[in-house]
Amino acid sequence: MSEATVRRYTAVSLFSGAGGFCEGARLAGFQVEAAVEIDRFAAVTYRGNFPETPLYEGDVASFLKPGRPEWEAERHRFEGVEAGGIDLVFGGPPCQGYSQIGTRDLDDPRNSLYGEFVRVLRSLQPRVFIMENVPNMLMLSRGIFRDRVLAAFRRAGYKNVAVRVIAATDFGVPQLRKRVIFFGLRDDVALPCTPGEWADKVLLNEKRPATTVGQAIGDLPQAVSHGACLPYPEAGPHNWIRDELRLDIDGTYYTSEYKLGRAGGLKLHNHHTKEIQQRRKDLIALLEPGMKGDSLPEGVWNGLRPEKWRRLHPDRPAYTILAQMHRDLSEWVHPDYERWITVREAARLQSFHDGFIFLSSEWQQLKQIGNAVPPLLGRVAALIAMTALQQLDGANTAVEPPLAELALPLGA
């Protein structure tokens, strides 16, 4: 049997946010050569967790744009990012224009940002790409944006594109969340089956039993830190998702050594939450796990917005974690305690391990988490691309470990 060829697979991340999708891509084996993010607060968190990845902090419309002053000032940091040198382009254009809870406005300017994804795709010509968004993108105005996106991919040289809706709960994420992914191949390469069949095979192989709120956060303490770190809590009973996220236990994908290195030691970061008034404590004390405002006694709830008050159920996945948490956490009441969930608990419900540290203000941290692609969901999406690349390169191709293994602890 011939010795395996070891290959380094490279990627460029667009609309990177705090880095949830990048974390998933690293888990799948990709070396992220460049990331692009315009939000300065998310960029702080990204740099803290991906010190080895050059980050272009600015408008994606100027990325790889010769002649644009902002790009010319930064291009020396991205010399390896060029056509023929990148295997994967991935990312999720902002989804608020398509989302069920967003504007659903055909003229929302964010709806056209997929065009920048396609422009970068055309410029770099990777063999594969992954673009993700909300499922409503497929349905808005009878699929007009789905058709526009697919037509743009075809013009860029990617006519072989699969579209799949995937559920986070199918891949170990303790949260009800669905996303649509577009998986495409450059026109001059081909798999032994359609891209859709390839994606379906990978997704089926990677399925895991659903995990719950209690399994994910049941070991975290009632007390919160108000910004400081806390001593690391005891693990309690083992389960798959808790072992994956805790610093002191080897998981299926993460080693304890790796997570501890990222955290800078055995300590609990980000276990803080918004202040809560006593009258609100009294109100949520009447909520049973899994119930919402319309279950409250007459005279306690005013009959408006039943979803404003919702207590998570410990034996079920969480409701969808949303960016609006930074304004109002009343839809995410802790299953056992009379308080909102903490930043760290929200991060765990998104499948971020405890070594991934969120920076900037609490308000911004919650927004970053809500906007993120869950890393375990990002991993399976990126794995579709990774296995396709390995197939294209030959079955005997091994993947060089990502540079993430060399990442410095926060603050080093």
Image (cartoon, helix red, strand yellow):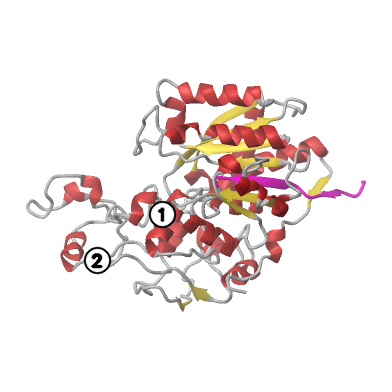
- Is any part of residue 26 visible from this angle? yes
- Relative placement, left or right, of 147 versus 158 is left
Residue 410 position, x and y percent, is 58, 70
- Residue at 58% from the left image edge and 61% from the top image edge: 47
- State whether residue 267 is above or below residue 305: below
Q: Is residue 249 magenta?
A: no
Q: Amino acid at mark 2?
A: Ile
Q: 263 or 126, which lies in front? A: 126
Helix, strand or loop at label 1? It is helix
Residue 84 position, x and y percent, is 78, 39
**What segment carries the magenta color?**
1-15
Q: Specify the label residue 276 is tagged with.
A: 2
Q: Is residue 10 magenta?
A: yes
Helix, strand or loop at label 2? It is loop
Q: Quadrant of the C terminus?
A: bottom right
For residue 142, which quarter of the picture? top left
For residue 361, which quarter of the picture? bottom left
- Relative placement, left or right, of 32 versus 93 is right
Outermost residue, left direction? 299
Q: Are marks 1 and 2 in contact (CB under 8 Å)?
A: no
Outermost residue, right direction? 2
